[in-house]
Amino acid sequence: MKKKIFAENVPMFSLGKPLPKVLYVIGVAVIFLTVYSQYFIRLGPITGYLVVYGIPVTVVSLFFGRELLSRAAKNNKTAAQLGLGLFGALTAVSVLIIAVAVVILSQFNPDIQTLLSKPNPVLDVPPNEAWVLIAVSILVVGPVEEFLFRGFMYGGLLNISKGKYWFPLAIGSSLMFSAVHAYYAVTYGVASVVPFIDLTAFGIAMCIAYYWSGGNLLMLALIHGAYDATGFLGVATTTNIGVAARFALILIGIICALIYLPRKIRLPPTEAPDAPVESGEPISTIK
């Protein structure tokens, strides 16, 4: 008999209208092609946003937009609690993994610390532009990336798989989310494993929150936007202020993890022998 490991009050994901596999593949291809196009074609700031975000959002909206938006603001309280809690918990885990990874990489490449000291190319903007990008992070980047990567890329896989393998699919879609940030590999070389671990952990946290909340995107977009905004806040003001803001967000997440995650996750009870079943009585499986 299978044991239920999640509390009954955790909203489960609703599959909705089936998404054809061919449309999912086309949508993912469009996302990657438009994101990578900026590495080969010189795009201005406005044109860049229109290409990298505008085109894939339009395509995804045509393919699956109604299904995504119909659930986007449901279970907001649950999504906020789970989103912040999972963000805090997996950020803490990723810090430990990154520390181990840096120690291992340092054994093979003593220049790891030098590579990691390079400035983040995304944050290479003047302070006055950074203030604008704080707003852009919250109003554009967070909502669009959650719509594309959690809604379509992960939600599409859930739809196609009919809700099966939701956790492995969360990992897979989070790796794809990390893969679109190729500029880290160009900037940091072998040391790019550090930001990629961080990105993957963040993606997994948002995927689980998306699944458990039943497809909420609104709260995840706010968390994503706030997280990105802390980086630009450090440019607009001082590095210490930006670091303090990001640390505060992570701390809130850890507190939420301690308060809310234990209520949502229940450890399986001790395995007990199955009770005998009378002849003709169907065996019930608790999922």
Image (cartoon, grey):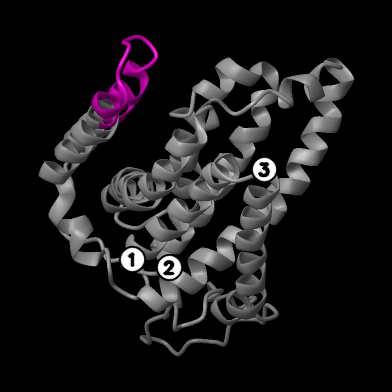
Mark 3 vs mark 1: which is more N-terminal? 1
Residue extending farthest to the front is 128
Placement of 84 over or under 97, stated as above or below: below
Comparing labels 3 and 2, the label whose residue is closer to the camera? 3
Q: Which amino acid, by three-letter code, is at mark 3?
A: Thr
Q: Residue at x 67, y 43 (%)?
A: 239
Q: Answer left or right for 225 relative to 251.
A: left
User: Residue most toward the left?
Assistant: 62
Which of disc 1 and disc 2 is earlier in sequence?
A: 1
Residue 188 seen anywhere in this rendered image of the structure: yes
Q: Mark 1: few, some, or many residues within 10 Å (few <14, many ≥20)?
A: many
Is residue 38 within the magenta segment? yes
Vertical relation: 80 (above or below) 124: below
The prevailing secondary structure element of the residues shown in magenta is: helix
Give how far apart the Cα atoms at labels 3 and 1 are.
39 Å
The residue carrying mark 2 is 212
Residue 18 visible in the shown view: no
Residue matched to label 1: 13
Circles 2 and 1 in contact, beta carbons < 8 Å? yes
Quarter-wise, where is residue 43 in the image? Answer: top left
**Element carrying mark 2:** helix
Residue on which the image places disc 3:
239
Q: Nearer the viewer, mark 3 or mark 1?
A: 3
Give the x, y percent position of residue 250. 64, 60
Cα separation, mark 2 vs mark 1, equals 6 Å
Between disc 3 and disc 2, whose residue precedes?
Answer: 2
Q: Could you give the CA–CA distance between mark 3 and mark 2, rounded to whole angstroms?
A: 35 Å
